[in-house]
Image (cartoon, rainbow, N blue to C red):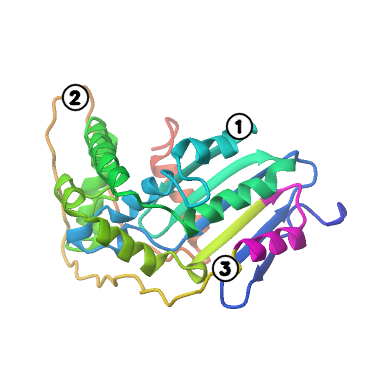
Amino acid sequence: MSSKIPVVNYLTSTLGSKIRIVTRPMNQNRSVSICLFVKVGSRNEHPEIAGITHLIEHLLFKGTEKRPSPMEISSAIEGVGGILNASTEQEFTTYWCKVPQPYMAEGLDLLVDMVRSPLFAPEELNRERLVIIEEQKMSGDHPDMQLESLMDKLLWPNHPLGQEIAGTRESIGSITHQMVLDYFAKYYSPSNMVISVAGDIDHDDVTQQVESLCEGWQAVETPSWIPFIEKQCAPRCSIASRKTEQSHLSIALPTVSATHPERYAIDVLNTILGEGMSSR
């Protein structure tokens, strides 16, 4: 791509009805950042499988048909000086890496390989249960994280949005190997994914590489999110008592949608009221 194209330029292409690709050329950079987004999160989970999205995120790092060990996955990126990580949110899961520009193809190959052909070895499932349970315990040591959890339960009672993203010890312990396979097959479809690439790249080159990596990968229709119907007509409050040196307070209000034109004014108001030591 010509360096005359502004760095603010975004290019999007879709491979038929399959994966969507978004690129941003930043030709002054010598590294490339690649993100693969899957439209699935804790919002898709019923209570009996709470935490399964996050569990699958962990398992995708444990081996694929092409790279059957965790070491082979991590070394593919870290071995060339790159960074590899992932996160699970309420409405999406992200797998990302940052690599030196000459290794962009390797980064794309790895991320697509992880989401397309994971091994899901039963022994790794049992190991990751313990890892996630330890993560749950760790989050319990942070009052600010517990505050967010209480707020989610207040905002979305009896709904997956109000559940812990990592699930509970009971729900994680009850998830079977077959449940993992079924859930993965239901949501990990190329038509439910977006790949974004930023750096010293060419959009057509990225598209051709992704098209080659996704060849023969059949798209399936994925279920929609579980809807939430707001019925609140009175204030809600939740209090948790702990022996800490500070008190933590959070107030939440329903407001405009994430695409509303006034969302920027809401961001400014939020900063004035509650961001940093100079606010309030």
The nearer-to-camera label among 2 and 1 is: 1
Residue at image mark 2: 244
Give the image location of residue 158, x and y in percent.
17, 63
Please tell me which of labels 1 and 3 falls first in the chain. 3
Q: Quadrant of the C terminus?
A: top left
Which stretch is magenta? 198-213
Residue at figure coordinates x 44%, y 50% from the top left: 269
Q: Tag 2: residue type?
A: Thr
37 lies left or right of 28:
left
Residue at image mark 1: 79
State the residue in front, 210 or 240. Answer: 210
Give the image location of residue 203, x and y in percent.
74, 60
State the residue in front, 267 or 93. Answer: 93
Other residues around mark 1 within 10 Å, as few (<14) / some (14–19) / many (≥20): few
Q: Is residue 58 magenta?
A: no
Q: Is residue 20 above or below residue 165?
A: below
Residue at figure coordinates x 13%, y 42% from the top left: 239
* Mark 1: secondary structure: loop
* Mark 2: secondary structure: loop
Please tell me which of labels 2 and 1 falls first in the chain. 1
27 lies left or right of 59:
right
Q: Tag 3: residue type?
A: Ile
Which quadrant holds residue 18? bottom right
The nearer-to-camera label among 1 and 3 is: 1
Q: Is residue 146 visible?
A: yes
Residue at image mark 3: 19
